[in-house]
Amino acid sequence: MLCPYCQNKESKVMDSRESEESIRRRRECLACGKRFTTYERTEKTDLVVIKKDGRKEPFNIEKVKAGILKACEKRPISIEKIDAICDEIESKLKKREKTEIPTALIGEIVMKKLKKIDEIAYLRFASVYKEFKDVGEFRKELKIFAR
Ligand SMILES: [Zn+2]
């Protein structure tokens, strides 16, 4: 949660109230001390991620976001942009008929999004995600950008 006054990421929750669709939280910024209110969706989905080894776990967009944030580190990409990408990914996944999502699909979607906005972030994500088997494969990806 970014502070709307100073953009600091850390805040403490002073008060929270849950309604059917959202949790309203009264927060205080740890940097500037100003207070603001956030509304977080409580919408629950039954999306399940199927991992490479077959294990299942509940889908959590925060995990996807963590991967994207890591790939975008020190790149000129705003947190708003990353949040927007995460929203798009989440709604895309919710629109599918199946509730089970292979991790490979999530990876592909993230890569497509990153490819459009920043090639370094894309390559970082892809190198972790695809576990490029050799340098040649990585070069091939690089060449796509050279075109
Ligand atoms: Zn602040």
Image: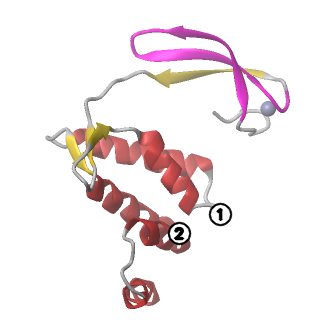
Contact, mark 2 vs mark 1 (Cβ under 8 Å): yes
Examine the rendered structure and indicate whether residue 143 appears above or below residue 106. below
Residue 147 in sight in this render: no
- Which residue is identified by label 1? 76
Give the x, y percent position of residue 106. 32, 54
Nearer-the-camera pick, 140 or 118: 140
Q: Residues within 10 Å of mark 1 (few under 14, many from 20)?
A: few
The quadrant the C terminus occupies is bottom left
Mark 1 lies on a secondary structure that is loop
Q: In which quarter of the image is ligand 1?
A: top right
Q: Which region of the structure is painted magenta?
A: 10-32
Label 1, ligand 1: CB separation under 8 Å = no
Examine the rendered structure and indicate whether residue 42 appears above or below residue 63. above
- Determine the residue positioned at 19% across, 38% down: 99
Q: Of marks 2 and 1, which one's residue comes earlier in the chain?
A: 1
| Prevailing SS of the magenta stretch | strand
Residue 140: mark in rendering = none
Residue 118: mark in rendering = 2
Examine the rendered structure and indicate whether residue 94 appears above or below residue 129. above
Q: In this view, does 12 lie to the left or right of 119?
A: right
On whether residue 29 falls in the magenta region, the answer is: yes
Q: Residues within 10 Å of mark 2 (few under 14, many from 20)?
A: some
- Residue at far left of view: 97
Nearer-the-camera pick, 130 or 143: 130
